[in-house]
Image (cartoon, helix red, strand yellow):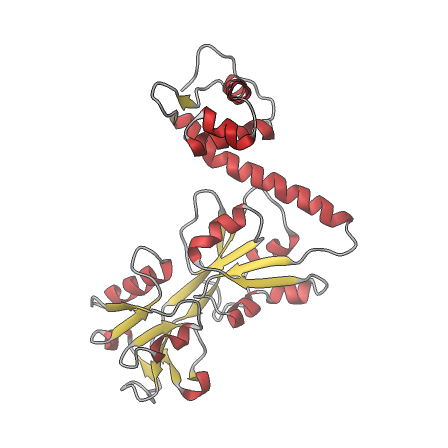
Amino acid sequence: MLNPAVSPSDEPLDARRLQQFLCVAEYSGFSRAAERLHLSQQAISSSVAKLEAQLGVTLFDRTGRQVRLTAAGEALREGASVLLAAGQVLARQVRDAAATQRRPFVVAHTPAVTSEEVHGVLEPVRTGMPDVSVTAVQMFPRDLESAVLDGTVDLALRRGITVPATLAAAVIAYHPLRIAVARGHRFAGRPTVAIRDLHDERIVVWAPPGKSFYTDFILSTCRRAGFEPTLVVNRIQGTTPASAVLDYPDAVALVTAPPGAALGGAVEVIDLADPPLAPVQAVWLPHTRSAIRDLLTTGDNPGSSLPMPHE
């Protein structure tokens, strides 16, 4: 909504004013934001007023006890956090360019993408930029977005296809689904199993439907095969996916591990007939540049177990 009292300007947005605006939005008030930033309330109000004048919009509804973001304010909050984070990344890249020892490129991955799969996905960097140091860390899905935004992580890998509102993303690899069963399960020893054969099986997942793309992907795969699966959420989180059946020996788990014996023979991984392909999605901060990231996100990735489908 345009504020008729002000004339908008095309000048670049001031980072300090954006930080103060975000603080007011977070605490729903100027006084609490002033306390948090150790500034006077008048200074915060003046800063936000100048930002509104520059943009030609009203950012807050000030009619109630708590200030509330307008539609324009919501749009600014969503973009401001990304813009400020990109500025921090640029400052770090400039410092790194002048440093004698470069910081490692940090890649986070969810437990659904194993360390071995991360190593395969990183093949273009390992061969194309052998002098680059990369650190891979495992994180739960709920922590990935904030880690990318605050610069703790340079690139995140997850099983997903939807793009977070504040981040950029691309699918860079696919891995075929297989099933893991405990030794002694009725499927053990079979060369292959069809998805429809799982209709009477309990399927171990790592989060409830709606909380994990990987769970939703498994649920959708079963429904396309014509049945509603019986899901059980694994009580052990963060371990190798194939280990899920150790505590549920009568159940199966859908994994991307290679076929054959696993975990010292306690688990067997079996090929699925016509296997669905589980995507690996790379997530990063928009408005940033990275030669390392470009190697991973452009073209077919040899770390994929199968060629990238052409969409």
Q: Looking at this view, is 98 or 177 the one in front? A: 98
**Identity of the residue drawn at 44% across and 31% down:** 25
Residue 133 x, y percent position in the rendering = 68, 62
Judge whether residue 26 can be spotted in this image. yes
126 vs 52, left or right, is right
Q: Residue 257 appears in which quarter of the rendering?
A: bottom left
149 vs 69, left or right, is right
**Identity of the residue drawn at 57% across and 37% down:** 84
In the image, residue 22 above or below residue 264:
above
Image quarter (top left, top right, bottom left or bottom right) of the N terminus: top left
Q: Which residue lies furthest to the top in this view?
A: 5
Q: Residue 129 appears in which quarter of the rendering?
A: bottom right
In the image, residue 203 above or below residue 4:
below
**Identity of the residue drawn at 29% across and 85% down:** 187
Q: Looking at this view, is 19 or 41 the one in front? A: 41
Image quarter (top left, top right, bottom left or bottom right) of the C terminus: bottom left
Q: How many marks?
A: 0
Residue 27 x, y percent position in the rendering = 43, 32
Residue 143 x, y percent position in the rendering = 46, 53
**Identity of the residue drawn at 30% across and 81% down:** 249
Judge whether residue 272 can be spotted in this image. no
Residue 186 x, y percent position in the rendering = 27, 86
